[in-house]
């Protein structure tokens, strides 16, 4: 097809030979299949900031490093310059996360290049070499559901060990490649250590996995891998090899403390009662 305007600069630079077809138009991006140096790749073209919801971006970009305070102020004010910087931060976050996760051995599309607001990456394919389906478009036997769920929980651990929480992990952002699930769509990925929402996002990500695969293997719905993983992470004892149970002992802080106080009070009353009886008897 004739290259769309946003891909033309990459054609001019020789990064893309031909544009094969448009694959998708999502909330944040348009995705194309392209040919490049004898390889078939995927080109993700980010939509303009104004075409996207920026409310949610606020959570995600918290604590994301910007180069200087002028940028930070402009981003906070929402000026045109600010929006452009916000936009760059958003796109770079996905590129950063892809390189970081690929480096940590997480199964994500191999990043190839980032140019003029376009991310070039591996095209994830199924057994026929076609663009891989999303998990949401697949059916699973209970056994396969359990197996993929376990794989993806381990991937969430691997990501966390690399300091990243996906933040939008679900059956819509995981593709089923010939060799198993591949995690995509990372512009909202957050720094696990520096973001106040990291715990909530990890819990939601891992909860989404349980809910989805729980459709095929219902016992998964009761699992609590998210809470278990986060508590191990906070304790500094999470590695990819840490055995997980999917169970979590909920601590009930204040409530339990009150129960303990009552227990002590009751014991003291009983003791006083006993002393009174002894004195009187
Ligand atoms: N590397 C890839 N290989 C194959 N298909 C891909 C790849 N990246 C994206 N896609 C396809 O394009 C769709 C949209 O990509 P992505 O989720 O990254 O963008 P998005 O704008 O967030 O879309 P959405 O709003 O649907 O979540 C995916 O659901 C998937 O079908
Ligand atoms: Mg998506």
Image (cartoon, rainbow, N blue to C red):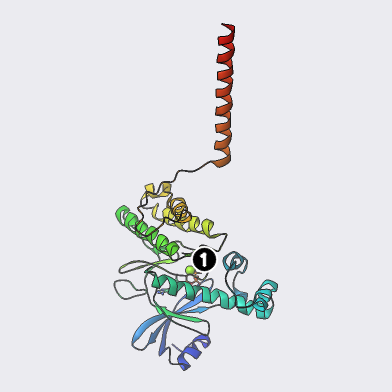
> CB of residue at label 1: within 8 Å of ligand 1?
no
Residue at left 40%, top 72%?
102
- Kindly identify which residue carries mark 1: 191
Work out whether residue 142 or residue 181 is closer to the camera in this orientation and state it: 181
Q: Give x and y (percent) for residue 198.
A: 53, 60
Q: Give x and y (percent) for residue 126.
A: 32, 71
Seen in the picture, residue 102 relative to 117 is either above or below; the reply is: above
Outermost residue toward the top in this view: 281
Residue at left 55%, top 19%?
271
Looking at the image, residue 215 sits to the left or right of residue 198; the answer is left
Seen in the picture, residue 127 relative to 206 is either above or below; the reply is: below
Outermost residue toward the front in this view: 279
**Residue 244 shows in this picture:** yes
Work out whether residue 164 or residue 142 is closer to the camera in this orientation and state it: 164
Q: Quadrant of residue 237?
A: bottom left
Q: Give x and y (percent) for residue 240.
A: 37, 60
Work out whether residue 161 or residue 146 is closer to the camera in this orientation and state it: 161
């Amino acid at each position: 097809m004739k290259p769309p305007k946003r891909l033309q600069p990459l054609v001019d630079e020789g990064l893309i030979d031909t544009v094969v077809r448009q694959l998708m138009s999502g909330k944040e991006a348009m995705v194309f299949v392209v040919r490049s140096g004898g390889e078939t790749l995927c080109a993700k073209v980010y939509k303009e900031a104004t075409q996207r919801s920026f409310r949610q971006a606020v959570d995600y970009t918290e604590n994301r490093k910007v180069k200087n305070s002028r940028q930070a102020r402009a981003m906070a004010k929402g000026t045109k310059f600010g929006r452009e910087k916000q936009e760059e931060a958003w796109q770079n976050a996905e590129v950063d996360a892809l390189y970081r996760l690929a480096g940590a051995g997480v199964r994500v599309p191999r990043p190839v290049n980032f140019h003029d607001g376009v991310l070039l990456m591996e095209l994830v394919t199924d057994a026929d070499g076609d663009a891989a389906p999303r998990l949401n478009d697949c059916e699973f036997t209970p056994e396969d559901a359990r197996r993929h769920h376990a794989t993806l929980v381990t991937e969430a651990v691997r990501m966390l060990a690399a300091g990243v929480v996906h933040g939008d992990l679900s059956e819509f952002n995981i593709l089923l490649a010939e060799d198993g699930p591949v995690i995509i769509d990372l512009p909202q990925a957050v720094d696990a250590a520096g973001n106040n929402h990291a715990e909530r996002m990890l819990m939601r990500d891992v909860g989404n996995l349980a809910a989805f695969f729980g459709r095929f293997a219902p016992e998964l719905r009761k699992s609590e891998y998210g809470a278990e993983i986060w508590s191990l992470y906070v304790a500094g004892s999470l590695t990819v090899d840490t055995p997980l149970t999917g169970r979590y002992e909920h601590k009930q802080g204040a409530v339990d403390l009150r129960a303990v106080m009552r227990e002590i009070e009751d014991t003291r009353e009983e003791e006083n009662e006993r002393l009174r009886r002894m004195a009187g008897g």
